[in-house]
Amino acid sequence: MPPEPTLGWDLGGAHLKAAAVDGHGRVTMVRQVSCPLWQGVQHFHAAADEVLETVGEGGPDRHAVTLTGELVDLFENRREGVQRLLNALCVHLPEGALEVYGGTRGFMSPAAAARHTGDVASANWLATASLLALQLDDGVLVDVGSTTTDVVPFARHRVRAEGFTDHHRLRSAELVYTGVVRTPVMAMARRVPMDGQWVPLMAEHFATAADVYRLLGQLPERADKLPSADNGPKSVWASARRLARMVGCDLEADMLDPWRAVAAHLAENQLQVLQTACDRALARVGLNARAPLVGAGVGRFLVRALAARLDRPYMDFCDLVVGSRQPGGDDAADCAPAVAVARLAQHPATLP
């Protein structure tokens, strides 16, 4: 008898992601909704309503959840964040239908999860890596999102993470706080080349990575769900204007090329940071030359570039999940942890 259809939830601090998986493991729906949780829990409730409206009546009765939103400064600490987010989700779902992913502890009830918040907090990366390790011998998950990047090696069907908490993952470069939408430009480099000189960037939140990749024509439209740094238009010209402000300039007519050059430098800086993290993971685990980089997240176009630079095969998370591509909308790789947590809940005996 096939497993019960399951709706996977990934409760983030900037987005809420959900994926419906049928009893044959086929992804039937993926949804990513803007959720600026740091501004108040009401944004979570609105996002959850939007997801459930998309699912509609007759959707899965079983729900599996993982989360990272406990990190936002709305909460005093991560324990409070986990407990409040689970309580908020239980407003929308029957508590008995909800299974919470606790990493190496497996799945548990919301009540049990409230007692094991350290295992539940920020475990979404482990769900994705665990699913990949079940399907591939060796590789490195590189999940580039709007805000962060996860770099997680796996070998011989086992996740080979060095760290499991946010702190230890930062120290091991398996969690890199850089993404393709929300990252402030001032965090992408300290200075940029202009007219033969190095110009320091202002330490101001004038522009973000979304402006960089919008100028370069690389930002997927579906990734661009959050307001710009100045709440202004999200056009190429507006992005150039915000980037110019970072070095104390105003945008002049017909002057996009200099700002595209600045954007290219910033993008290269970010790619080098991610390459260093990948090099470290590959060296530590000692993966063979054919072990792929598996790209996930809305910024996985960077993973393709990394794979080419490292002379390694590239594999898209979508290639491993049946029914994962949804033309015109979000797809499974955009919301990989939501897909993974649903699939793992359907086959808990396979958890590493």
Image (cartoon, grey):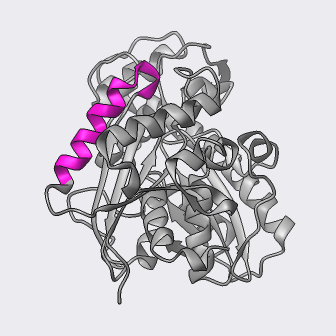
Identify the residue at image location x=39%, y=55%: 96
The magenta stretch is 37-54
- Between 59 and 174, the one lying in front of the other is 59
User: Magenta stretch: residue 290 in it?
Assistant: no
Measured as percent of width and height from the top left, residue 29 is found at 26, 63
- Which quadrant of the figure has residue 311? bottom right
Label total for image = 0
Residue 111 in sight: yes
Q: Is residue 54 left or right of residue 217?
A: left
User: Magenta stretch: residue 42 in it?
Assistant: yes
Residue 313 in sight: no
Above or below: residue 271 compared with residue 5: above
Identify the residue at image location x=24%, y=56%: 329
Identify the residue at image location x=39%, y=35%: 88
Above or below: residue 251 compared with residue 8: above
- Which quadrant of the figure has residue 19? bottom left
- Between 223 and 239, the one lying in front of the other is 223
Position of the C terminus, as image quadrant, is bottom right
Measured as percent of width and height from the top left, residue 287 is found at 78, 77
- Which quadrant of the figure has residue 154? bottom right
Measured as percent of width and height from the top left, residue 68 is found at 55, 41
Above or below: residue 42 compared with residue 142: above
Q: Is residue 297 left or right of residue 59?
A: right
Position of the N terminus, as image quadrant, is bottom left
Measured as percent of width and height from the top left, residue 52 is found at 23, 48
User: Of all residues shown, which one is farthest toward the left?
Assistant: 57
Dominant secondary structure, magenta:
helix
